[in-house]
Image (cartoon, rainbow, N blue to C red):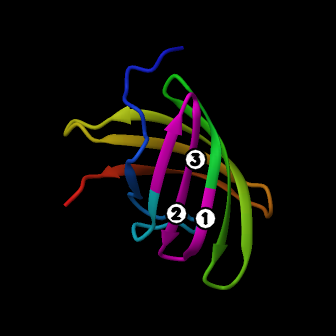
Amino acid sequence: MLSVLPSLDGLEFAPVGRAELGEVDPGTRFAYHEEDGLVWADYRGGEVVHGHLVGTRTGDTLDFRYVQLNRAGETGSGHCTSVLTRLPDGRLRLEESWRWESRPGAGSSAVEEVLPA
């Protein structure tokens, strides 16, 4: 399935809120990269000291695993499937369904493209 939406390479995303069982919040920033169907990002901010995700993109669906370190010094990891959409103002949005693999819990969340200042 071919994508009609652009590459995520070089784009920055921020969560629109904080999921009940999640650790990322509006203060977290994701720096995305994409090449030949591979996606990865580094992220930090809010409760996350450092996080990394890596996975694949097929059409406008991302499938990745993430690992992160929080401010309490705890590590966590999980799996996420995201669907890429375009907002009315032209920015990109990822609608995410995730679940922890290192602890109990799952949820849904969204991140939106942050435009350069």
Q: At which x and y percent is residue 57?
A: 57, 31
Magenta part, dominant SS: strand
Circle 2 sits on which residue? 43
Dot 1 alpha-carbon crowd within 10 angstroms: few under 14, some 14 to 19, many 20 or more: many
The one of 91 and 34 positioned closer to us in this rendering: 34
Report if the CB atoms under discs 1 and 2 are less than 8 Å apart: yes
Name the disc covering residue 59, or none. none
Residue located 49% across and 27% down the image? 60
Q: Residue at x 65, y 43 (%)?
A: 64
Q: Secondary structure at mark 1?
A: strand
Q: CA distance from mark 3 to mark 1?
A: 11 Å
Indicate the secondary structure of the residue bearing disc 3: strand
Determine which quarter of the picture holds residue 70.
Answer: bottom right
Task: Identify the amino acid type marked 3.
Answer: Trp
What's drawn in magenta, residue-wise?
31-52
- Circle 3 sits on which residue? 40
Rounded to the nearest whole Å, what is the CA distance between mark 1 and mark 2?
5 Å
Please, is residue 53 above or below residue 85 in the view?
A: below
Q: What is the crowding at mark 2: few (fewer than 14 residues within 10 Å), some, or many (at least 20)?
A: many
On screen, residue 36 above or below 45: above
